[in-house]
Image: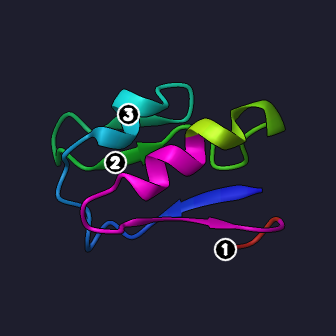
Amino acid sequence: MRVVANLNVCQGHARCEDLCPEVFSTDAVEGKVVIEHPEFPPELEDKVRLAVRNCPEGALRIAKGGKA
């Protein structure tokens, strides 16, 4: 599975980073999400899904397979 972000929508609340710092971080200049590990391991799936659901703007989504 793979997580992708729409940076045009992201407002930099960093909830994703708070909930799953293993996958998400925040760009120091833009203040927007950085996906450190787009293809995350199965053991992080619950945390990634929680982060996706908690994005206030809906800027994150999970895509199955290698391409978003």
Identify the element where label 3 is drawn. Answer: helix
Q: Amino acid at mark 1?
A: Ala
In the rendered image, the vertical position of residue 45 relative to residue 52, given as above or below: above
Packing grade of label 2 (10 A; few <14, some 14-19, many >=20) is: many
Residue corresponding to mark 2: 33
Cα separation, mark 1 vs mark 3, equals 20 Å
The residue that mark 3 highlights is 17
**Location of residue 60 in the rendering, given as x and y in whole percent from the top left corner:** 45, 62
**Amino acid type of the residue tagged 2 in the rendering:** Val
Asked whether 46 or 4 is in front, the reply is 46
Q: Is residue 52 above or below residue 57?
A: above
Count neighbours of disc 1 (C-alpha within 10 A) and say few if under 14, some if 14 to 19, many if 20 or more. few
Which residue is depicted at the point 54% across and 37% down?
A: 36
Residue depicted at x 65% and y 40% = 46
Going by the numbered disc 3, the residue's amino acid type is Glu
Tell me: residue 52, above or below residue 68: above
The C terminus lies in which quarter of the figure? Answer: bottom right
Q: Quadrant of the N terminus?
A: bottom right
Residue 22 versus residue 49 in the image, above or below: above
Question: In the image shown, does 53 or 7 lie closer to the viewer?
Answer: 53
Magenta extent: 48-65
Measured as percent of width and height from the top left, residue 3 is found at 60, 57
Q: Earlier in the sequence, mark 2 or mark 1?
A: 2
* Mark earlier in primary sequence (1, 3): 3
Q: CA distance from mark 3 to mark 2?
A: 8 Å
Residue at which label 1 appears: 68
Determine contact: label 2, label 1, CB under 8 Å: no
Q: Secondary structure at mark 2?
A: strand
Mark found first going from the N terminus, 3 or 2: 3
